Image: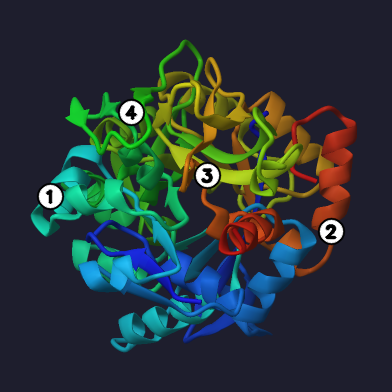
Amino acid sequence: MKVAIIDYGAGNVRSVLFALERLGVEAVLTDDFQTICSADKIIFPGQGEARAAMRQLQARGLDKLIPQLKQPFLGICIGMQLLCEHSEENNTKCLGVIPQKVRLFKGHDLKVPHVGWNTAATATSNAPIWHADLKYYYFVHSYFVEKGDFTTLRCDYGNGFSAGLQKDNFYAVQFHPEKSGRAGELLLNQFLNT
Amino acid sequence: MLTKRIIPCLDIKDGRTVKGTQFENLRDAGDPVELGKRYSEEGADELVFLDITATNERRKTLAALVRRIARNLNIPFTVGGGISSLEDVFVLLDNGADKVSINSAAVKRPELIQEIAQTFGNQCVVLAIDAKPIADDWFVYLNGGRVQTPIRLLDWAVQGAKLGAGEILFTSMAHDGTKQGFANTALRQISEVVSIPVIASGGAGTMQDFYDTYTIGKADAALAASIFHFKEIEIADLKRFLHNKKIPIRL
């Protein structure tokens, strides 16, 4: 199996590479179109700020490529947010693959960023990857994807948000499966087996 | 529900874990990779590695060590100790660290917080603050508690959060090593002036101390070293204790 991790200069990709290595999967970190297109699975990780991340994607032409990909594709953290339509973070137009919006956590007594282990509850249960009830995952983010038609996992924080999304071959999670212990490893394995 | 975190802290010197009391009588406590793995299997929610190596070779050994830890660890980990530039941060993150903790360098040059936050995101900046109560107020200390500053704890916490710190790791030097409980009054005050998560450090002695710091101290996470290293408290037992007392905990 060929796994490509999209390289767009976004933060901590090393953890994802190491997590895949622990699962016995060799992955390649790349921004090369041909390598990405010929991969069996694609992972789109990242940390950082939405506008800067979009600029990095545009500079590499990846903003045009990503929406056309047909393989199982997994966005993680900001990777998930970038798949959406629009982010409140610096008023950024995103890739528009999943028609949902990204907002900033706000609220009296609400700690921002949302940091730590929280449970995800299944919102729609078509694929085994989303059978995540009562499992804890590690989250660290200040912006969140609103709940909507493509929400597969819900998380209770603030007024509740999307911990998982899916539209066709595009899967996405807000938490870090590569840092979420056994539960995260299980989810990555299920993605690799889709 | 978001759970309260339990974070063991490991001191690293020349690539090995050391145990000691207040940086004295250091003893080798083994391979940090193995210890980190053990703690994660026992249920630790995160780990903090604090590098106390003083040699010039420090950076290179630390980067190699961080890489070995990251390869083997499936929970988040923070690396601290002597970080003073963006380059330091880049090397650690590039080798697999999830967050960095900065302390003295940020007091000397507060813009460092902003630079790291803007380059790598707020989530990876943990602002570590060491402070001590003098008369009716708390003051910030530098260089592992050796140098006093005129900076007030709450002022610095607010400024750090404004500059983009993602979390505050507050160590009370008056409580550290005493095993008499965390500095809950000061912790609560910090929590009330900033909206970022606060990690309590210094003073853990009993399971009740953790309960108190999450409730009275309003801490989001609690860090401890010796009680875990010396197995005075097992993480699994602590988690069950807190869970039974209705604290949200990842079991």
Viewer-proximal residue among A114 and A95: A95
- Residue B96 can be seen, yes or no: no
Q: Residue furthest left?
A: A59
Q: Residues within 10 Å of mark 4 (few under 14, many from 20)?
A: some
Foreground pick, A61 / A186: A61
- The x and y percentages for residue A94 are 24, 35
Q: Nearer the viewer, residue A32 or B117?
A: A32
Q: Quadrant of residue B32?
A: bottom right
Q: Nearer the viewer, mark 3 or mark 1?
A: 1
Tag 2 subunit: B
* Residue contact between numbered discs 4 and 1, judged by CB atoms under 8 Å: no
SS under mark 1: helix
Residue B184 percent coordinates (x, y): 63, 30
Query: In the image, which disc is placed on residue A58?
Result: 1
- The Cα atoms of the two marked residues, 1 and 2, are separated by 50 Å
Which of the labelled discs sits on residue B158, or is there none? 4
Residue that carries the numbered disc 3 in the rendered image = A175
Q: What residue is shown at x 46% (from left), y 48% (from top)?
A: A169
> Which label sits in the foreground, 4 or 3?
3
Residue type highlighted by circle 2: Glu
Are discs 4 and 1 located on one and the same chain? Answer: no
**Residue in view at x 77 percent, y 34 percent:** B211
Q: Secondary structure at mark 3?
A: loop
Residues at badges 3 and 1 in contact (C-beta under 8 Å)? no
Amino acid beneath label 3: Phe
Q: Are marks 2 and 3 on the same chain?
A: no
Q: Secondary structure at mark 4?
A: helix
Residue at image location 25% in from the left, 46% down from the top:
B113
To the question of a shared chain for discs 3 and 1, the answer is yes
| Residue sitting nearer the eye, A184 or A115 | A184
